Image (cartoon, helix red, strand yellow):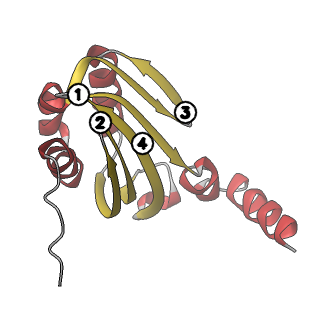
């Protein structure tokens, strides 16, 4: 049986950061991300560590719980991709119950990560959990799937 190769330290640091995500983690962003980080997700396009810090502060102030688990990794020279599941609870979504969202991230790094792009279904994250809009979103998805 082959042993799996050791994960680069930056991958381990990132996974630990997101597995323990909370307000206390925001101060650790500079350990993982470069000063000129470009962070992109379906709702945001941020430039710089200061903007990323503000983003996380706002996100975590309004979220009751947010943690990630990782299931697969593709690692190449200077970049990697991770599939993940985020579990979060927000008082304005789904009556505050825990919501699971699957996604994938593509990251580039030298000593630290300078590019981070997340891909996920915004509808599954937001729209499906808002009264009336959620019903309509699910109806549209079911109608298109037939």
Residue at the disc numbered 1:
110
Which quadrant of the rendered structure holds the C terminus?
Answer: bottom right
What residue sits 46% from the left and 42% below the top? 118
- What percent of the width, then of the height, locates residue 102? 47, 60
Residue situated in front as seen by the camera: 67 or 58: 67
Q: CA distance from mark 1 to mark 2?
A: 6 Å
Q: CA distance from mark 3 to mark 1?
A: 26 Å
The spot of residue 88 in percent (x, y) is 37, 56
Residue 78 numbered mark, or none:
2
Question: Which residue is found at the position 17% from the left and 55% from the top?
Answer: 7
Mark 3, mark 4: which one is toward the viewer? 4
Q: Label 3, label 4: how many angstroms apart (C-alpha)?
A: 16 Å
Q: Tell which circle, 1 or 2, labels the residue nearer the N-terminal end.
A: 2
Where does the image place residue 3, in percent across and percent down from the top left? 14, 74
What residue is drawn where x is 59% and y is 57%?
Answer: 124
Circles 1 and 2 in contact, beta carbons < 8 Å: yes
How far separated are the C-alphas under marks 3 and 2? Answer: 26 Å
- Local SS, label 1: loop
Q: Which residue is mark 3?
A: 43
| Numbered mark located on residue 106 in the image | 4
Q: Residues within 10 Å of mark 2 (few under 14, many from 20)?
A: few
Q: Secondary structure at mark 2?
A: loop
């Amino acid at each position: 049986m082959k042993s799996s190769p050791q994960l680069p330290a930056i991958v381990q640091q990132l996974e630990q950061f997101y597995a323990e995500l909370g307000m206390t983690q925001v101060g650790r962003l500079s350990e993982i991300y470069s000063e000129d980080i470009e962070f992109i997700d379906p709702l945001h396009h941020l430039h710089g560590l200061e903007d990323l810090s503000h983003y996380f502060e706002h996100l975590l102030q309004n979220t009751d719980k947010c943690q990630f688990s990782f299931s697969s990794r593709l690692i190449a020279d200077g970049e990697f991709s991770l599939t993940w599941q985020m579990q979060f609870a927000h008082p304005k979504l789904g009556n505050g119950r825990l919501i699971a969202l699957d996604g994938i991230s593509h990251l580039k790094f030298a000593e630290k990560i300078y590019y981070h792009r997340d891909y996920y279904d915004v509808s599954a994250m937001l729209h499906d959990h808002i009264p009336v809009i959620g019903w309509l979103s699910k109806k549209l998805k079911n109608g298109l799937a037939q």
